[in-house]
């Protein structure tokens, strides 16, 4: 029985993880559940899964949950989240927290010797060096949940990291693939929220539309697979069937394919190194018909270009890129800024940033706070 | 230094293997070379590689080669071939012999404890059970060289055979993809010899045109990967970029891709489990553009259907299928029969065959001889 702590259990990845746990009651147990404010859904999850610990954002919610679910310990706030990540009896921490909030819990879970199933990109975008050093020190497993990184990880099985020639990270291109700058000028948040292939949360869906999501994935892959950023190539593949590929020094490419269903990579992270039978859909190549590939439009979708620059420069640049992006996406979702304001503002913030290197957790969080402060003034 | 015995060194796979050996003089040595009648090319290969043993078909050729190349032992005929396969000081036997001739040398090489790099399909088509039992007994490696089987083998690395859901064997479809029976009626051998993607020998190129090549590969895969024939699915993929795929029980598919260049799978078989750097071409996805998939036309290309039936029935059926096909392809290449005569005649031969099961080498060779005898009368 594998005990799983799900950080962010009411989000898209969290609920899909609970589906998988329900389908495999003899293998998995949801030992810890955490959420922000979606108390109603968390309550249903507690009733069904009876975790030993639940964590919510606010003290008042915690108090009311304690009364309702006396068999579950209920904590709150950042301290509660740290307890959930690091101090509970669990075998693996699935981190599907949204944004920068995910970094510290990952770090402390690793320090506590827990294996991590990582769906929180920001952990590696902002804390790549810090986190990978901790993983090496503690000899824990850091298992990717993102479909692209899971694909790369699967393509690496039975192969050696030193033999990687390049990584081909596929991108759907999002809802605005092929758009010009002029066309992007007036796109709305509701247009941006319509992803052609994947059902995901709002933040990541906007990131897909700006292609920042792919940029963050480049940075994540750089750390997760310990390779130079320029060996990572982005290819737009609108069908989202090939989830990514690894080319080796012998020019043989290994790819992972599947229908766009996040339950497949989540399952793999939970069952690794095994694969478990599941009832999900197969790719039917006779129906799929055609897979296409295009070069991304780096001039129009500047977020991708900015992410490459940030990871090449290293140090605090990716922290700044990510912090600025989080704030600006939120402002765009609230219709306070335009779609192009996101990339234009990130560019300005990065240009004026004075970089720092070899960051510890405190410095990373401080730089992040400063960027957010500047942008929300 | 890995010593390699190349059975069939003057053919397409043999010469490409020698190219790889030349590119890696510190790793590989051509210890044994064998050919049929292409004495002139063999002479050049002996001069360049100075093998300890060479084998030719005829006694007279052997005598003249001995005079010319006093430093190389020269043997001839089937006995010479057996010595080359089983009794020489080599680490791996690359079997690229053409047709049924390849079975016995593979068998004796395995019995002698040699690892095999197998480019001779007929070995497993006719002798699947016998060969795989010998591989298990001797605990040698049987490494596929065919691009499709190499792809499957690569997709299996880091995974377990028991987790295979299905194998998706890709087929280019050959030069007559999309043709109707009426259109196939009058196609000539020179049309059939024009393969759209791969440069290969004449026999295998005709087999690609009839799709018998894919049928033989289904049978080969059934034995090599120990899976039921109906878990092997053929998909026509005219670009020959995805060389085959394995879908696992979790509906995750692992594929191997590359430009259509046989040196990539040959290299992998020689360097396995390592991968060696090479100067061959990469896939450029921005130029590749589109990958397509179609269901094969089983009604028109009956060879593929016949091969499935033969492997489902098992026993001596695949031996008969293969023997009849070898004779008929030769007759077609000599313009003695029509293209459709190949599949029509195989069908008749199979229909009247009385099957035998659990065959030993002698029975296989006898059944093969009988089929050939009947067809050449």
Image: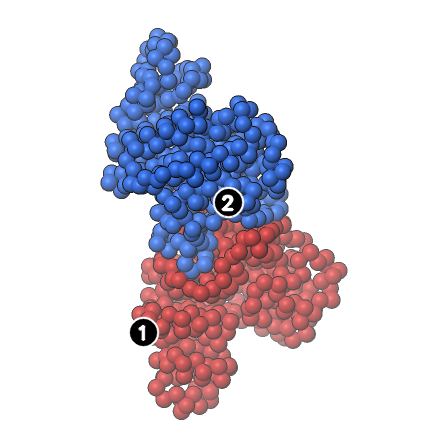
Chain colours: A red, B blue
Q: Is residue A159 visible?
A: no
Residue drawn at x 69%, y 56% is A178
Residue under label 2: B170
| Same chain check for tags 2 and 1 | no
Quadrant of the rendering where the N terminus of chain A is positioned: bottom left
**Marks 2 and 1, Cα distance to the nearest angstrom?**
47 Å
Q: Is residue A150 above or below residue A335?
A: above
Q: Nearer the viewer, residue A110 or B359?
A: B359
Residue A333: give x, y in percent of width and height: 64, 73
Residue B255: give x, y in percent of width and height: 47, 49
The reply to whether dot 2 and dot 1 touch (C-beta < 8 Å) is no
Mark 1 Cα shell of 10 Å, populated few (<14), some (14-19), many (≥20)? some
Residue drawn at x 34%, y 27% is B5
Can you tell which of label 2 and label 1 is closer to the viewer?
Answer: 2
Q: Is residue A247 above or below residue A326?
A: above
Tell whether B6 sits left or right of B169. Answer: left
Tell whether A122 sits left or right of B314. Answer: right
The chain carrying label 2 is B
Q: How many marks?
A: 2
Mark 1 element type: loop
């Amino acid at each position: 029985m594998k005990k799983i702590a799900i950080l962010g259990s009411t989000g898209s990845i969290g609920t899909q993880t609970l589906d998988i746990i329900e389908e495999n009651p003899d293998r998995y147990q949801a030992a810890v559940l955490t959420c922000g404010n979606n108390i109603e859904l968390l309550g249903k999850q507690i009733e069904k899964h009876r975790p030993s610990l639940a964590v919510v954002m606010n003290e008042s919610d915690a108090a009311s949950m304690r009364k309702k679910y006396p068999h579950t310990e209920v904590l709150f706030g950042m301290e509660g989240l740290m307890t959930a990540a690091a101090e509970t009896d669990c075998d693996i921490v699935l981190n599907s927290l949204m944004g920068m909030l995910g970094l510290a819990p990952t770090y402390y879970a690793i320090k506590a010797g827990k294996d991590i199933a990582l769906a929180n990109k920001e952990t590696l975008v902002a804390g790549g060096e810090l986190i990978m050093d901790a993983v090496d020190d503690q000899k824990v497993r850091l298992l990717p949940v993102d479909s692209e990184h899971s694909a790369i990880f699967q393509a690496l099985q039975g192969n050696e990291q030193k033999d990687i020639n390049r990584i081909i990270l596929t991108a759907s291109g999002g809802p605005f693939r092929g758009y010009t700058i002029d066309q992007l000028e007036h796109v709305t948040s509701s247009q941006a929220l319509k992803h052609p292939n994947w059902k995901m949360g709002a933040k990541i869906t906007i990131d897909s539309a700006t292609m920042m999501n792919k940029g963050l994935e480049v940075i994540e892959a750089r750390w997760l697979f310990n390779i130079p950023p320029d060996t990572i190539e982005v290819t737009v593949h609108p069908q989202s069937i090939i989830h990514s590929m690894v080319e080796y020094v012998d020019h043989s490419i290994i790819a992972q394919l599947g229908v766009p269903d996040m339950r497949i990579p989540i399952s793999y992270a939970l069952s690794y190194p095994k694969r478990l039978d599941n009832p999900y859909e197969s790719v039917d190549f006779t129906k799929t018909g055609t897979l296409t590939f295009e070069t991304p439009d780096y001039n129009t979708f500047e977020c991708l270009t900015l992410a490459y620059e940030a990871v090449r420069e290293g140090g605090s640049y990716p922290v700044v890129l990510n912090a600025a992006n989080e704030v600006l996406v939120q402002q765009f979702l609230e219709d306070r800024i335009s779609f192009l304001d996101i990339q234009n503002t990130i560019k300005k913030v990065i240009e004026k940033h004075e970089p720092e290197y070899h960051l510890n957790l405190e410095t990373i969080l401080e730089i992040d706070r400063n960027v957010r402060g500047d942008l929300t003034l």
